[in-house]
Image (tube, grey):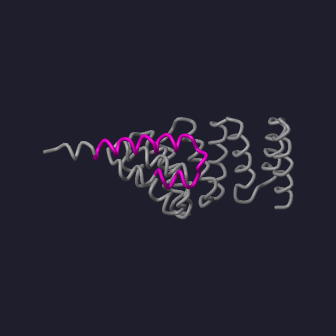
Amino acid sequence: MLYELAAVLRADELSQKGKLEESLRLLEQADDLGSEGGFLAYNRAVILQQNAKLDEAIAAYRKALDAKPDFYEALFNLGNALADGGRPDEAIDAYERARKLNDKDADLYYNWAEALEDTGRNDEAILRYKEAVRLNPNHTLALYNLGRRYIEKHQHGAAVETLEKAHKSDETNKDVAGLLDKARRLMAEDVANETRIP
């Protein structure tokens, strides 16, 4: 295990210096010597993903999962790589499997919601955003996207409430501030329209 850690540290150093091929070759050679639990394949996948080599990263994550099927981080990052590669249905499957290993990760639910949106399953996405916010009440991106979905569903009061939380969580985020202003305008229009009804 010590040589694996040394290989990962050196590979990370090489990758940060822009020596991607040398970094990957080092991890491959170390993995050929025998890796326990897919550790080296996982770290190789991370470096590949950071360098936008998604197909290779996906294959490396799968290799890590072959060695250790209950490797949460590998499943989570496999889902991310699949989503980034335009394969949201496969990403959803990876996130569902990852949740069975760790149902306390707000980022898992957030990324899962994003993949669900990519497949048009917006009501399911709302549930995952809500779960992300339950686990991390200050998850600005989940709050923002939940607010956006509420606006689309014409639930402007819920959008304002949600976006106010997002704004409180990150007051410098201009996207949140802009969407909050829009939600407030829409809610004001709703109130004005209700008072006009005879």
**Residue 42 to residue 55: above or below:** below
Q: Which residue lies furthest to the left in this view?
A: 198
Q: Which residue is drawn at 79% across and 48% down?
A: 32
Q: Residue at x 34, y 46 (%)?
A: 187
Out of 122 and 29, give the one closest to the viewer.
122
Quadrant the C terminus occupies: top left
The image quadrant that residue 15 belongs to is top right
Q: Which residue is drawn at 78% across and 54% down?
A: 34
The magenta stretch spans residue 189: yes
The magenta stretch spans residue 105: no
Where is residue 138? Give x, y as percent.
55, 58
Magenta region's main secondary structure? helix
Mark count: 0
Where is residue 1? Give x, y as percent.
81, 61
Magenta range is 163-191
In this picture, residue 51 sits left or right of residue 115: right
Where is residue 110? Give x, y as percent.
52, 51
Out of 29 and 98, give the one closest to the viewer.
98
In this picture, residue 82 sits left or right of residue 119: right
Out of 117 and 175, give the one closest to the viewer.
175
Q: Residue at x 79, y 44 (%)?
A: 28
**Residue 111 to residue 25: above or below:** below
Out of 13 and 36, give the one closest to the viewer.
13
Where is residue 102? Give x, y as percent.
56, 63
**Residue 15 to residue 137: above or below:** above
In this picture, residue 6 sits left or right of residue 47: right
